[in-house]
């Protein structure tokens, strides 16, 4: 394992992913973790991330010198680099040498461990106020910029390396190569962490955890739950029962994907609960977005728990595990380490016994989203499931502005299917993060079709580009694709006579309309 010590910037996750792209397993730890605890994890190497602080500011995160003296190879980046310099007796100061953005780097020692085989002049991504003006004793300076005399250094004997810039961002043109040089040449790590090895490892871990007991997994139609279920299915086969609650708010074909394609690919036991009537009844007369969300969430839990109860009644107390598709970013964000937690299932159905507790099985806890997709692919899940774009839990219920009714859902499903089909044909699925299609059910506008006046509803297209859905920009889509979608929707979907494009970034707009 390579530990990435997080100094509180947004870079740690990116670094961890880059290490994994180099086929080396990585984990993020907070900089507040005592060094002894880090070393107890027996890391093959340690990477110190960037961070927002200045190393000599009061309260700035620091590091115990012991980290550098344990014989574990260390690579400091940006703040991590400065911290390494300062801790080991180099000089870091605010000499006014600020650099932000793409910066030319001059490599002064071409054959060095980090820079071997990379050009003498290369572009790197900088973001710093302070700068290192003198390297610690025993270190060789390997690169500089116009304003920073020490932009990279290394000490091969002690296996300590550092760069002032951010090799993990793609704007640093040889960043990945430099990182790999550290991992393979500096730290001597063999790149052998692959999707196949993850599957093998997880299958064993799941078998060990579950033993001969039984597990339940809720399928949402999304990537994470499908891959988690497929992995557990591979490990324990018929000891797993999957539950799919059809709330009637899915898009066209999605329920069938779960019922047919998922089952065909995995051979899983699937219990489908058709609860669409129940959801429609609960949503009748409601148009406030938050109320809709609450109702859908509440009904979902009730139906899912009822299904759990039935499975418990059929299969007995052997059912002790609940599978969840928790991903690594969620684990990091909630400050969590490793291991599994017990959750107490809510029991507001009045059905589940008071003391029922499921132990969680979370086989994706170590993985990033793109790795989950790779695992899914390797497990033989169809592309429609593995490459699926994000879709909100409350489904089309929050894409109808106004009351949710069966007719409106059917109408929106048709319009959405057309938009998705055309985006796929145009080859835009990868470029677009997601494209909500929204029905403005309470709005009507006048139109003309054939010889007659129409008075129909508008459909909104909301294509967005994003990295993580926290921020997003509206996608500049080709006009001819927009034209095709518009023509088809107004021709093929009854009661829709207008298609409009949402050109709002996030912020200020959210991705979904409700
Ligand atoms: P917003 O609309 O907040 O959406 O910009 C950000 C991302 O989250 C998705 N989303 C949800 N996902 N349950 C989910 O699982 C929800 O209730 C929910 N609401 C929004 C949305 O599709 C986008 O990807």
Image: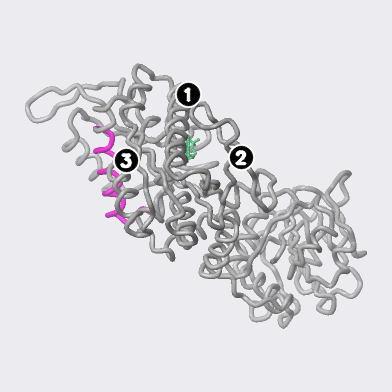
**329 shown above or below 149:** above
Foreground tag (1 vs 2): 2
| Residue 484, percent from left and from top | 23, 45
Considering the image in quadrants, where does the N terminus appear?
Answer: bottom right
Residue 111 pos. (x, y %): 72, 83
Please state the horizontal and vertical placement of residue 55, each as a whole percent of the image: 85, 52
Marks 1 and 2 sit apart, C-alpha to C-alpha, by 26 Å
Left or right: where 93 falls relative to 443: right
Q: Residue at x 74, y 57 (%)?
A: 5
- Horizontally, is 205 left or right of 215 in the view? right
Q: How is the image coloured?
A: one colour
Q: Secondary structure at mark 2?
A: strand
Query: Is 418 one of the magenta-colored residues?
Result: yes
Residue pointed to by mark 1 = 290
Asked which secondary structure carries label 3, the reply is: loop
Q: Residues within 10 Å of mark 3 (few under 14, many from 20)?
A: some
User: Residue 343: which disc?
Assistant: 2
Q: Which callout, 3 or 1, points at the residue further toward the start of the chain?
A: 3
The residue closer to the viewer here, 87 or 122, is 87
Q: Which residue is mark 3?
A: 251
Q: Which residues are magenta?
A: 411-429
| Label 3, ligand 1: CB separation under 8 Å | no
Closest to the camera, between mark 2 and mark 3, is 2
């Amino acid at each position: 394992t390579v530990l990435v010590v997080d100094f509180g910037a947004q870079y740690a996750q990116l670094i961890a992913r880059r290490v994994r792209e180099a086929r080396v397993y990585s984990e993020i730890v907070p900089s507040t973790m005592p060094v002894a605890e880090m070393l107890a994890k027996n890391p093959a190497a340690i990477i110190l991330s960037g961070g927002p602080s200045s190393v000599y500011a009061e309260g700035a995160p620091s590091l115990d010198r012991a980290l550098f003296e344990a014989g574990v190879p260390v690579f400091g980046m940006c703040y991590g680099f400065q911290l390494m310099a300062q801790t080991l007796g180099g000089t870091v100061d605010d000499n006014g040498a600020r650099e932000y953005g793409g910066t030319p780097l001059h490599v002064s020692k071409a054959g060095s461990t980090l820079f071997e085989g990379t050009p003498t002049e290369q572009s790197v991504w900088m973001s710093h106020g302070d700068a290192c003006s003198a390297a610690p004793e025993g270190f060789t300076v390997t690169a500089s910029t116009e304003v920073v005399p020490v932009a990279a250094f290394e000490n091969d004997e002690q296996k300590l390396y550092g760069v002032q810039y951010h090799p993990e961002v793609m704007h640093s043109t040889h960043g990945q190569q430099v990182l790999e040089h550290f991992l393979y040449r500096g730290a001597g790590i063999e790149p052998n962490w692959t999707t196949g090895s993850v599957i093998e490892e997880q299958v064993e871990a799941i078998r060990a955890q579950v033993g001969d007991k039984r597990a339940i997994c809720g399928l949402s139609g999304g990537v994470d739950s499908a891959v988690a279920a497929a992995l557990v299915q591979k490990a324990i086969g018929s000891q797993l029962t999957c539950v799919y609650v059809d709330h009637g708010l899915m898009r066209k074909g999605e329920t069938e994907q779960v019922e047919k394609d998922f089952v065909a690919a995995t051979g899983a036991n699937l219990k489908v609960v058709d609860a669409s009537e129940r959801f429609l009844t609960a949503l009748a007369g409601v148009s406030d977005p938050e109320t809709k969300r609450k109702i859908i969430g509440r009904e979902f839990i009730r139906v899912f728990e009822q299904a759990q109860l039935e499975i418990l009644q059929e299969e007995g107390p052997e059912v002790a595990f609940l599978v969840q598709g928790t991903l690594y970013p969620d684990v990091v964000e909630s400050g969590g380490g490793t291991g599994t937690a017990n959750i107490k299932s809510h029991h507001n159905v009045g059905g589940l016994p008071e003391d029922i507790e499921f132990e969680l099985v979370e086989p994706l806890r170590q993985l990033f989203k793109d790795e989950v997709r790779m695992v899914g692919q390797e497990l033989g899940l169809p592309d429609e499931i593995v490459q699926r774009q994000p879709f909100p839990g409350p489904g089309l219920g929050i894409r109808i502005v106004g009351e949710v009714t069966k007719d409106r859902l059917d109408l929106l499903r048709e319009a959405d299917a057309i938009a998705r089909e055309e985006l796929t044909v145009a080859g835009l699925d990868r470029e677009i993060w997601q494209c909500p299609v929204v029905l403005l059910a309470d709005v009507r506008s006048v139109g003309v079709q054939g010889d007659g006046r129409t008075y129909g509803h508008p459909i909104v297209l909301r294509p967005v580009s994003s990295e993580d859905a926290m921020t997003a920009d509206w996608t500049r889509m080709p006009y001819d694709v927009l034209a095709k979608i518009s023509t088809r929707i107004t021709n093929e979907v009854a009661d829709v006579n207008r298609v409009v494009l949402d050109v709002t970034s996030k912020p200020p707009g959210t991705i979904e309309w409700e």
